Amino acid sequence: MMQTAVRTREDPVAAARDMSNRRRPLLVDPVELGKKVRGARHGAGYDKAEDCAADLAAVGVEMQGYTLRAIERGDQLPSLEQIAALVIVLNPPAGIHYFMTPAMPPELAQRFGHANCGG
């Protein structure tokens, strides 16, 4: 008797759910990044996240105070545009490196610090 292969379709919703449940290592630790953002905000004289968010909007990046607080708690990673705006508004020492290198594993932070960003 000849067996025929039965082809079943994978449920795309179940497959997506399985993929979303897998944890991948993060390049940047959101909690450490959030601590640096909060420190830079306070260092720049912003007691309220809403005041800082208003100045971020002035450079073209809309962000609510609750979003900034979520970033500071490590609940949310900022977008590249948000990081750039935070560097412009908060003017931390060492620019973007102030935020990024402490939030990265040491071996990657060293490579990031030595990266040639010139054209």
Image: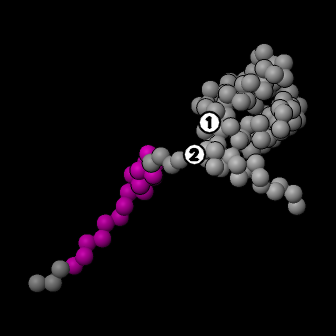
Q: Residue at x 17, y 80 (%)?
A: 3
Q: Quadrant of residue 65?
A: top right
Q: Amino acid at mark 2?
A: Leu
**SS category of the residue bearing label 1:** helix
Residue 14 appears in view: yes
- Image mark for residue 56: none
Tag 2 and tag 1, C-beta contact below 8 Å: yes
Q: Residue at x 61, y 38 (%)?
A: 29
Residue 51 appears in view: no
Relative placement, left or right, of 6 versus 53 is left
The residue that mark 2 highlights is 26
Q: Residue at x 83, y 39 (%)?
A: 95
Q: Quadrant of the C terminus?
A: bottom right
Tell me the magenta residue range. Answer: 4-21
In the current view of this chain or complex, which residue is farthest to the top? 47
The residue that mark 1 highlights is 30
Q: Residue at x 81, y 22 (%)?
A: 43
In the current view of this chain or complex, which residue is farthest to the bottom? 1
- Residue 30, how many percent across, how many down? 62, 36
Label 1, residues with CA under 10 Å away: few <14, some 14-19, many ≥20: many
Q: Quadrant of the N terminus?
A: bottom left
Residue 72 drawn above or below residue 99: above
- Residue 18, how many percent across, how many down? 41, 50
Relative placement, left or right, of 99 versus 89 is left
Q: Amino acid at mark 1?
A: Pro
